[in-house]
Amino acid sequence: MSNPSVSIALTGSGGAGVMTAGQMLLTAAARAGCYGLMSRSLGPQIRGGESAALLRLSTAPVDGPDDIFDLLLAFDWGNIDRFAAELPLNENSVVIYDPGQGPVPEVVREPGPRLVQVPLKEIAKGIPGGRENMVGLGLITTLIGLDAASLRQVIEERLGRKGAEAVDTSWQAVEAGAEAATVDGLPRLDQASPAAPGSRWQISGNDAVGLGALRGGVRFVAAYPITPATEILEWMAVNLPKVGGALVQCEDELASVCMALGGSYAGVPSMTATAGPGLALMTEAIGLGVASETPVVIANVMRGGPSTGIPTKSEQSDLNIACYGLHGDAPHIVTAPTSIADCVFTAQWTVYLAEALQCPAILLSDQAMGQAQAVIEKPAEVAFIGRRKVARPADLENYQRYRITADGISPVALPGMPGGQHTADGLEHAPSGTPSTQAAHHQEQLDKRRRKLDRFDYGDHWAIRAGDPEAELALITFGSLTGAARDAVTRCAEAGLPVRLIAPRLLLPVQVERLEAALAGATKLLIVEQNHEAQLRHLLAGHIRLPAVVDSLNRAGPLTIRPGEIVSALTTLAA
């Protein structure tokens, strides 16, 4: 059977402590031996106001949300209509609410969940200094069978600096909440076995991208804060100096990518991080990186678009601009991690690819992955370190920066290397680097820049594959939807419907031969993506031979595509 889990939503207005409670619950679950995922839903104001902490806890790893929430705990109903559609409920769900906060809104009542009143505020008032979110924590942990000692440990760590009184007060509120836990029928996590110390991490997708880039050799970051990518910069600002690196907060996105290119030109693996509006501003300078063959990593955490769009909600709609947004013929790398845990590996691998191929590489994460936190196994150490082909003394005799080579990769002279002087700019050039308008030079440099990407051996890391590799029914997705796709493939297998899953980690250059081999024998294909225009489907159709029958399950954000929807689409396609 597929892994049992419990999905919990905590909602409330600003000041209710929703996010604090959610983070403490996730940490306590991890200490108790569980895995988990916590995402958040915010209103359009980004900071303050109504919010929801959305958790899925399990005794096995989880990479995405389930179909419905088993438990919704509402501290109040403030503006819940703004994200009620993101809180799917049904008749098996339990909604716990404080009757003093007013009647249950119709958007919550309509799906028919079981409604349970618990006077959270009244209980908290009975404890000097008590808070409703701590009462709620005690209620939830008791209902799902989570080890209370783990929660006590988390409270002591989080509140210990405020003194013993703050810890005791919070624990009294937790115990009071536990006494109010009289609801039955919810999934429980009693069977979790404590993990060995240090064997699991609690990390966000944005922090994981930062860690992976650091492991890959990045030592200079230049960036401008933007939702939902800012946490990458915050993590890097603290951790880069520990390894001798530096971060510069720039005045805008144009300066950011140009400074990153400058740091890279000087020989230091460099990156920037942004979201869709910032990526749009960076495209000309990314083209400069292609033409000058200067490696740089651009981590793009996708959000709803176009224009300013929906900054706090997730979408996979930057695929087109990432692949096609540069003017001219500009071969470059586009990657996409398949989970929060995979953000570490994919970011490290992306740095390696950019450096090895001397070109820009765009890493596509998204808000659902970047700002979510997960409990994962400790990421393995891998050997991918960004190293470019640096010129040797023999290469510097009559040095040609853009010398035509069989693999398309030319030795690069770093500033200050005797004999390595050359022109480096965005103009087309001869092999020496001297600007040229000759057709022959333009053709050979275009061929060279394409050849180095096409002939590189990307190994088995180009995609995640799961399910039955011989199944006639295939599923392709990318990014944060991979977790839901995995769940769907597992459910289909349990129902007797074999499905093969392909989730490309390398989106550009499209791996034509590998994709066609992975699809060999498949007669029907479902492509799942979180955007309005089916961008992944069109990317694939432009490069490979697809099966005879192809269907799309695509929807713009902010409502994520859930496993049950994918199962339904696969079942319909198979019929």
Image: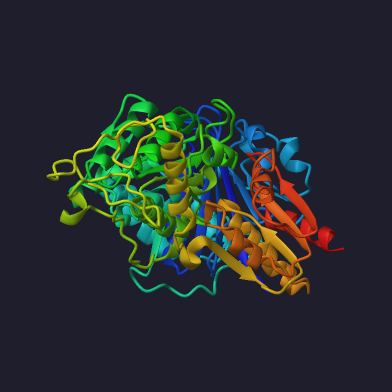
How far from the left and from the top, in percent, is residue 231?
A: 38, 41
Q: Answer whether residue 12 is visible to the viewer in this image.
A: no
User: 109 or 374: which is nearer to us?
Assistant: 374
- Please give the name of the residue rendered at 72% of the width and 41% of the height, measured from the top-left corner: 108
Q: Residue furthest right?
A: 575
Count of marks placed on residues: 0
Q: At which x and y percent is residue 372? A: 49, 49
Q: Position of residue 221 (x, y in %)?
A: 29, 40
Which image quarter: residue 295? Answer: top left
- Decide if residue 554 is in sight here: yes
Which one is in front, 336 or 95? Answer: 336
Residue 459 vertical placement versus 368 (above, below): below
In depth, the one of 27 and 352 nearer the eye is: 352
Left or right? Give the position of 267 relative to 386.
left
Side (left or right) of 422 relative to 56? left
Q: Nearer the viewer, residue 366 or 105?
A: 366
Residue name at image x 54 percent, y 62 percent: 463
Q: Position of residue 32 (x, y in %)?
A: 45, 67
Quarter of the rendering occupied by the C terminus: bottom right
Left or right of residue 19, residue 306 in this image: right
